[in-house]
Structures are given as C-alpha cells and as structure tokens.
Image: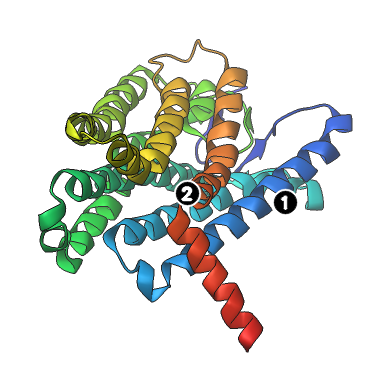
Amino acid sequence: MHRNQTDVQYFIIKGISDDPNLQFPIFLLVLLIYLITLCGNITILLACQDPQLHTPMYFFLGNLSIVDICCSTVSLHKILTNYLTGDNMVSFFACMTQMYMFGSLAGLELFILTAMSYDRYVAICKPLFYHMVMNTRTCAIMASACWVLGFSQDLPPIGIVYNFSCYTSIEINHFFCDIFPLMKISCNDTSLVQMLFFIEGLFPMILTPFVLTLVPYIFIIVAILKIRSGTGRRKAFYTCSSHLMVVTLLYTTISSQYLKPNLSSSLESRKLFALFNTAAVPMLNPIIYSLKNKDVKNSLKRSVRMVKLH
C-alpha cells in the first residue's frame, strides 16, 4: 500500500529485535550502556574543569564528551522509552529531526577528532611553539568550524529525504530513524540520494577528516622514530595513543555502517554496526581516555580529596 507523504503522520520504530523474550534484556543492556556513557563523559567534563587541565587537548576532549552524550541520547532514547511506555511510534517531523541530529553529531565527532590530531601534532612535532600556535583563539576557531561543518554537511541528503512523496510502509526496521532504513520503505527513486549520501559521506564526512587526521599522524610517527631514547619514544607515543585508539575505533565502525552505495546490503548488519557505533563507542571513549591518561585520573583524585575536605 502506497502512502502519500501528507498522509504519513508517524512511523513505527521496529527496534533491535521482535522477540518479546529479548525486550527486557535489551532494555537493561542499553540502559546500562547509556548510564555508563553519561557517567563516563560527565566525569571527563568535570575533570576538564580542573584549572590544571585548561589546555587545548582537554578543551577538545570536553567537546568530544558533549557530542558523545548527545549522540547516545539521540539514538538510544527511543529503545528505552519504547520499553517503558510501549509506544514505538515517532512523528514524521521527529523522525526527520532525529535523522538529521544523528548524522550531524556523527560527522561532528570526526571533525573534533581531526582537530585533536593537529593538537597532538603541534605538541609532539613543534613543542616549543605549542602555546603560541594552540592558543585560546585558535582553539575556539577550530571548535566553531567543527560544529558548523558538522551541522551543515548532512543538510542536502536529509532535505531530499524530507521531500519524499510516498512510502510503502510506515515501519522502520531500525532502533531509531536512520536514512537507509527510511529509504528502504520509500517508493520514490532513491538512487540520487543514495549516490549523494555515498559521495558526501565518502569525501566531506569521512574521507576528508580521515586524510586530515592521517597526515598529522604521519609526521608524528616520523618525529617519534627520530627520538633516540626508548623512554622518549614511549612518552611521545603515550601522549597520542588514546586519541589514536578512538580514531581507529570510530572510523572502522562508521565505514562499515555507511560506506555502501546501495540498499542491497542487509539492514540487520547495518543495525548491528549502528548499535555498536551509537552505544559502545561513546561509552568506550571516556574509558579509553581516563584509563590511559594520568592527568584525568589525577584530576579526579584531587576532586575526591576536595569533596572529602568539605
């Protein structure tokens, strides 16, 4: 049955699984992941308020934590509310908004990680000029550019999807409104938006920030290899190891999820990659940074001591 866009007032979110026996375990797992994500990223934000951590690296790390909190909330809240209320419907406008917000936040995270890679490049390759180059004004401009690019790069494909004229179903086979499951149920010709999304995703959203992240790391690796002492090399690598782990994890999951130019690939596989990308990655980011970062751990210890004194 074809439905005109004007008749589609809402969509039904299918969720992760149809099995009723899995609904409660899925709810508990997602709730646990979401709470860990919130606590971990809020902890990072609190640590970044420490006067001793008012540096460019922690400024960008704070931005990354805000994005992770928002991305998890945008994508996972429907799973939680569906189980608690039994309402798996989402309005047409709310669906479009969620799709736009998720795509924008995903792109924004990549841009922030790119900015962080240049911070690490200056810190390791140009240490004498670090405070001169990475000053407050430079950091503010870089962060602002990341937010503007993040929330503008997803507008063209979302604009086309918003104007789709009909749908073959109102059930979206996903746990949130994502562009590929929505195109799957559209009776419009989606070849243009698929190609646009693939080209835009490949170049502005993924390939460009990937290359801009890779180039500084080439110089960083060359600089580290030139360090004669083993201790010096380990110390230099340690300063960027957390960021490198997060970058590798994120690009792997996003590429597996989105760099497929057609809809023939399984929506179930996309759903699994999306679940890992929207749930596990934001949860792991603060864990990686806090476990491998002495400054963050020392800041948290100072905060605990201050609380005990008061």
Say which element carries label 2.
Answer: helix
Q: Which residue is drawn at the image coordinates 33% and 69% (left, top)?
A: 54
Horizontally, residue 39 falls left or right of residue 41, namely right
Q: In this view, does 269 lie above or below 278?
A: above
Which amino acid, by three-letter code, is at mark 1? Thr
Q: Nearer the viewer, residue 241 or 99?
A: 241
From this viewpoint, which residue is outermost toward the bottom?
310
Any mark on residue 41, and which?
Answer: none
From this viewpoint, which residue is outermost toward the top?
264
Image position, residue 69 (x, y; %): 52, 55
Image position, residue 85 (x, y; %): 79, 52
The colour scheme of the drawn protein is rainbow
Q: Mark 1 points at which residue?
A: 81
Quadrant in which the C terminus appears = bottom right
Q: Is residue 258 above or below residue 9?
A: above
Q: Nearer the viewer, residue 283 or 205?
A: 283
Mark closest to the chain's N terminus, 1 or 2? 1
Q: Which residue is drawn at the image coordinates 55% and 62% (left, top)?
A: 43
Which amino acid, by three-letter code, is at mark 2? Tyr
**Camera-nearest label, 1 or 2:** 2
Q: Which residue is drawn at the image coordinates 62% and 45% (left, top)?
A: 76
Horizontally, residue 165 falls left or right of residue 217, namely right
Horizontally, residue 185 falls left or right of residue 219, namely right
Horizontally, residue 51 falls left or right of residue 184, namely left
Q: Which residue is drawn at the image coordinates 37% and 36% (left, top)?
A: 244
Any mark on residue 289, and which?
Answer: 2
Q: Which quadrant of the structure image shows residue 190?
A: top left
